[in-house]
């Protein structure tokens, strides 16, 4: 009976998340990295910007000191809803930077589910590309539904951390 309960609990908990995280090539931690704008495919305004800030902090924790693209100075509704102007500004900035790799992606889900508990739900895709050629070296995706008292940002931290665990970072050479 105890084994059945344990198996049932394990299956219930594993149904809350899904990750496809392949191993990456080895990246040198002392390479120049930039976090570029993520695409917001969720119904939550500014979800991509929130995920980018978490991503930058998680990269730093893993030994990568990435530069963030400069924030847009316009905050009107059109610029929030239309991602193309921000992408163009970030690409123009990137062309002036000595960057080896960019990390970007998309936010598919970033909200609280409806219902009594209102659990958070987050879905994110990340990819690492060459800054010069645009060649994609690594891509991973993950989703997670949190528990009733968990925050969306906390769930986002967990998803991004799980995804970044697939990056092979070689220590900086001294």
Image (spheres, rainbow, N blue to C red):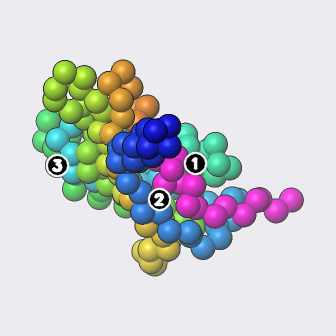
Quarter of the image where one finds residue 90: bottom left
Q: Foreground residue, 5 or 104?
A: 5
Q: Foreground residue, 1 or 118?
A: 1
Q: How many marks?
A: 3
**Mark 3: which secondary structure?**
loop
Up/down of 136 relative to 154, above or below? below
Q: How far is disc 2 from disc 1 in space, using C-alphas?
A: 10 Å
The residue lying at 36 percent from left, 29 percent from top is 147
Q: Residue 102: image x %, image y %?
A: 49, 62
Using a 10 Å C-alpha cutoff, classify the residue at mark 3 as few (fewer than 14 neighbours), some (14 to 19) or many (20 or more). Answer: few
**According to the image, label 1 marks what residue?**
59
| Mark 2 vs 1, N-terminal side | 1
Using a 10 Å C-alpha cutoff, classify the residue at mark 1 as few (fewer than 14 neighbours), some (14 to 19) or many (20 or more). Answer: many
Quarter of the image where one finds residue 111: top left
First to last magenta residue range: 160-174
Left or right placement of residue 151 versus residue 25 in this view: left
Q: Does residue 38 show up?
A: no
| Mark 3 vs 1, N-terminal side | 1
Tell whether label 2 touches label 3 (CB within 8 Å). Answer: no
């Amino acid at each position: 009976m105890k084994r059945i309960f344990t198996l049932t609990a394990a299956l219930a908990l594993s149904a809350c998340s899904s990750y496809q995280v392949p191993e990456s090539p080895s990246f040198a931690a002392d390479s120049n990295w930039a976090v570029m704008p993520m695409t917001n495919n969720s119904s939550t305004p500014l979800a991509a910007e929130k995920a980018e800030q978490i991503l930058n902090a998680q990269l730093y924790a893993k030994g990568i000191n990435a530069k963030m693209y400069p924030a847009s100075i316009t905050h009107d509704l059109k610029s929030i809803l239309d991602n193309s102007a921000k992408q163009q500004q970030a690409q123009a900035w990137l062309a002036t930077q000595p960057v080896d790799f960019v990390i970007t992606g998309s936010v598919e889900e970033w909200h609280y589910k409806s219902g009594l508990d209102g659990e958070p739900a987050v879905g994110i895709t990340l990819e690492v590309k060459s800054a010069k050629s645009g060649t994609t070296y690594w891509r991973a995706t993950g989703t997670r539904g949190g528990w009733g008292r968990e925050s969306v940002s906390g769930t986002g931290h967990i998803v991004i951390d799980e995804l970044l665990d697939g990056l092979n970072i070689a220590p900086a050479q001294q």
